[in-house]
Amino acid sequence: MLIYETTDSKFAARAVSALEAAGIAAYKTGTGYSDAFHGPMLPTESQVCIYIEQETDAGRANEILLKLGAVPEESVGVVLERYKILVVIAALVALAVGVLIAANWNSP
């Protein structure tokens, strides 16, 4: 089961070691960030995926990853809520500007 993705291969190695030390069977795939030369169309980074073998270990694994400094992903709902707030603010600003322009339209 995929538990975490990162471009930091050193973090991934520390995480797998910590998970295994806690008795959680884990492994990683991918190379992480590459310092090699990259051409104009080549990707500059690669994900390292951290997996656990038993889904029942997910809770403990997440706790361990957070203690190591893993950044939790924001849920889509939180992102959409922020977007809605920004849209409402932009609409209110546009409305206020429209009212000001309309009020001063026929002013001498």
Image (cartoon, helix red, strand yellow):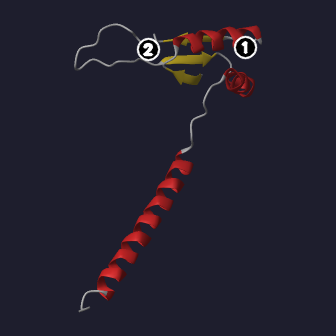
Point out which mark residue 13 bears: none
> Image quadrant for the C terminus?
bottom left
Q: Disc 1 vs disc 2: which is toward the camera?
A: 2
Q: Secondary structure at mark 2?
A: loop
Residue 105, how many percent across, how many down?
Answer: 25, 87
- Of all residues, the one furthest to the front in this rendering is 108
Location of mark 1 (residue): 24
The answer to whether mark 1 and mark 2 are in CB contact below 8 A is: no
Residue displayed at 56% across by 43% down = 75
Residue displayed at 58% across by 24% down = 4
Residue 62, how many percent across, how many down?
Answer: 69, 26
| Position of 51 relative to 94 (above/below) | above
| Position of 81 relative to 53 (above/below) | below
Residue 72: image quadrant is top right
Residue 56: image quadrant is top right
Location of mark 2 (residue): 33
Q: Which residue is nearer to you in this view: 89 or 105?
A: 105
| Position of 28 relative to 93 (above/below) | above
Residue displayed at 46% across by 13% down = 32
Q: Which kind of residue does numbered mark 1 sit on?
A: Ile
> Image quadrant for the N terminus?
top right
